[in-house]
Image (cartoon, rainbow, N blue to C red):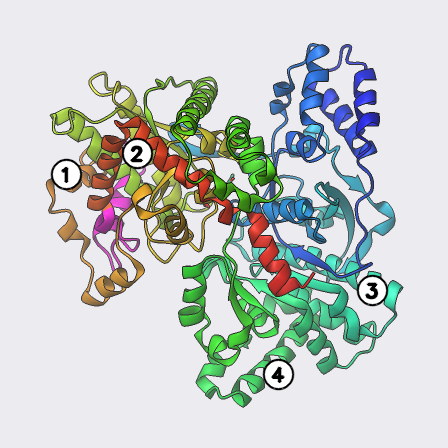
Amino acid sequence: MEKTLFLHDLEELDIQNKDVITLYNEISALAMKHAGNMDEFGGYKCAYYLSMEFLIGRSFYNNLMELGVLEETKKILALKGIDINVFEEIEDAALGNGGLGRLAACFLDSAAGLGLPLHGFGIRYKYGLFKQAVENGCQVELPDDWQRFGDPWSVRRDSEKRVIEYADMRVYAVPYDMPVFGEKTNRLRLYQAEGDAGAEKISEYLYPADDTDEGKILRLRQEYFFSAAAVADLVECYVKRHGKNFEKFPEYNVIQLNDTHPVIAVAEFIRLLTTEYRKKFTDALNIAKRTFAYTNHTILPEALECWKEEYVRKILPDIAEIMIKISVFASREYQSLGCTKEQALEMAIFKGGKFYMANLAVYVAKNVNGVAGLHTEILKNRLFATAHKTYPQKFMNKTNGVTHRRWLELCNKELAELIDKTIGNGWRKDISLLSNLNGFTENTVNGFIEVKKIKKRQLLKYIAEKEGMEIPENFLVFAQVKRLHEYKRQLMTAFAILELYYGIKSGKLSNLHPCVFIFGAKSAPSYKRAKTIIRFINAIADKINSDALTNGRLKVVFVRNYNVSYAEKIVAGADVSLQVSTAGLEASGTGNMKFMMNGAVTCGTMDGANIEIVERAGLENNYIFGATVEELANIKKAGYNPAVCVSDPAHKQAVETLTDGTFSDGGSGEFKELYECLLHGENPDGYFVLHDLGSYVQTLISICNDYVNNKKFAEKQLINVANSAYFSSDRTIKEYAEHIWKI
Ligand SMILES: *Cc1c(COP(=O)(O)O)cnc(C)c1O
């Protein structure tokens, strides 16, 4: 960065009569101009991250921070009469859904921060994840036209556009490169589809509705679109520098597949080598086996993609043939390595007229990793047990992380400065030094209490402005913010809140410390049950917030359009992080890490990275409850009957609000349906909400009681901060670099 030139130009910048969007574009353009070039692909060994999602959030503040000019920019703008916070009007680039997309963004940030060559490939969606409004308590989806603010951080590369061929159409993939600033400047390359109207549809929406054949095919087109463009870029780049002998390709390229969406890249790579470069199939396959690595993010079947043969044949006939051929090789190989026919069939890539993309990834990838200790064990012992038995050396764990630059330095400057004051600022470069915070003095605890107060005040002020709801500062803040999914059990929190509410009303909980529950969650547009849960939470919020008898003690707020920028405020201001998924179903979670880093204690189940959080910060400094994976297995074996749980009168009262007229669902019948699915049917309460509800309520009550001793509680929170270094994605990225990428 030509820092002095940038600051000089900024001082000279004429701001007369310019609106915020214009200023945003002009200041960003100045930073781009002086930032220096992005690194080239392929000069030496680089890792490439293929991901359907990059949930970047707002770039403006983060980029200025990474370039080392944020504070000076703030000062110069202030002299011109501009408060830098006005740029909060520029909305997030939400080219992702949730955890998986945010992880991709954190990884890019950490790699650049550490000076490691990691570049991203994805899609430049015209519309990102929908904007969420709430009407009558229900989610309404609005298009997210993020480009209306301009896109000053991207560089369009017309000269590098290429054609992507489908059997029925040809489409241009035009790269837009976004710099990722740090010790070095890496590149996030997002392709935009151009051509006729049909072509442009390919990069129009993130996850277009796929409940029709047409929708499914569009999704497949998207996956092939960016995977094929990325593979072609890398192969072309290699050929230019090293010629057409691909033996050394893996010495320069390692391609990380983020979940199953880009797995089709493997088949495209083999297609390219065997057709354009006339390599033998077995040679191409062997090079692929040394090049690709695969990260699994979930064991939920909905994310383990299967493609119907007829769809693939229709638009990508060559790719279908290649995947069938790989499947034959895989089956032979599994059997030659000691698997039975049945076992080989279990791991088959092509069977019953469908392609199993996870099986393709597991067979070809040189490494397969889960994203937290428990998750990786489940992959090894259950989901991919046969593959693990056959190729044990492939499997490894890489516990997720989050970048401490955005999730601590940027979103909680006050805490970062307190840490500087206590242990020096070396931790900002070498996050492992954060552990020096352990053994803190009373002074630091007092400092932390002050910081938490400030961040909570900022959060509550923001909520008051955005949601129109006042929350007093003395309230204990619980937060459950994440995508809405049954396995994440927002419904269990809703029932628990009702129990607290009725307890306060009846006088049983007359001494409960005042508290607020903050929810933030988007539901997938077609996920009906999740939408019902949003409606139920909003109905509960309306009732509780308008009850004069209790609302000095208990409040509930559902914040609209939860996104990265909202998350930055919530993780910094919250006291307690709610991470209450059904044990075994949350692969890792990363929200839990952001909260920990900002000193919220975890109230959660033994699931995902929660286990590793309490391993490091201590069980006694967090609040763990609920059935473990093993316990749930036993309960299932014995036959789970949720009706038994509802014999408890408090649970009964909470659950029956769904049907007894306490709340209205506007006549849709959805609350009754939710009730039925908890108590009746074939697999009632499949997520064990009612099983864990009792211990959840007790845990929430003890947190409120502990909070009364403010100092002791702050100590627990601070111990969480002090032991959060492990959850920086700097640590995660170093592990990928060392064990998988060898860069
Ligand atoms: C971190 C983050 C997530 C992931 O949260 P989990 O609790 O791990 O599911 C989702 N959405 C946004 C906006 C985030 O910042």
Spatial CA span between label 1 and label 3: 66 Å
Q: Earlier in the sequence, mark 4 or mark 1?
A: 4
Q: Residue at x 71, y 28 (%)?
A: 69
Q: Earlier in the sequence, mark 2 or mark 4?
A: 4
Q: Which residue is mark 4?
A: 329
**How far across and down, in percent of the image, does residue 680 sit?**
21, 54
Three-letter amino acid code of the residue under disc 2: Asp
Label 1 packing within 10 angstroms: few (<14), some (14-19), many (20+): some
Image height check: is 532 above or below 566?
Answer: below
Residue depth check, mark 2 versus mark 4: number of the one nearer the observer: 4
Q: Any atom of ligand 1 within 8 Å of the CB at mark 3? A: no
Q: Amino acid at mark 4?
A: Phe
Where is residue 421 drawn, in percent x and y? Answer: 53, 28
Residue occupying image coordinates x 20% and y 60%:
640
Q: Which residue is mark 3?
A: 238
Cα distance, mark 2 to mark 4?
Answer: 54 Å
Measured Cα–Cα span from mark 3 to mark 4: 27 Å
Kindly identify which residue carries mark 1. 650
The residue that label 2 is drawn on is 665
Mark 2 Cα within 10 Å, few/some/many (few <14, many 20+)?
some
Question: On the image, which quarter does residue 709 sit in?
Answer: top left
Q: Is residue 677 magenta?
A: yes
Q: In the image shown, does 581 or 106 lie closer to the viewer? A: 106
Determine crowd level at label 4: few under 14, some 14-19, many 20+ residues with C-alpha closer than 10 A.
some
Residue type for callout 1:
Ala
Q: Nearer the viewer, residue 200 or 63?
A: 63
Residue 19 visible to an observer of this rendering: no
Magenta span of residues = 664-692
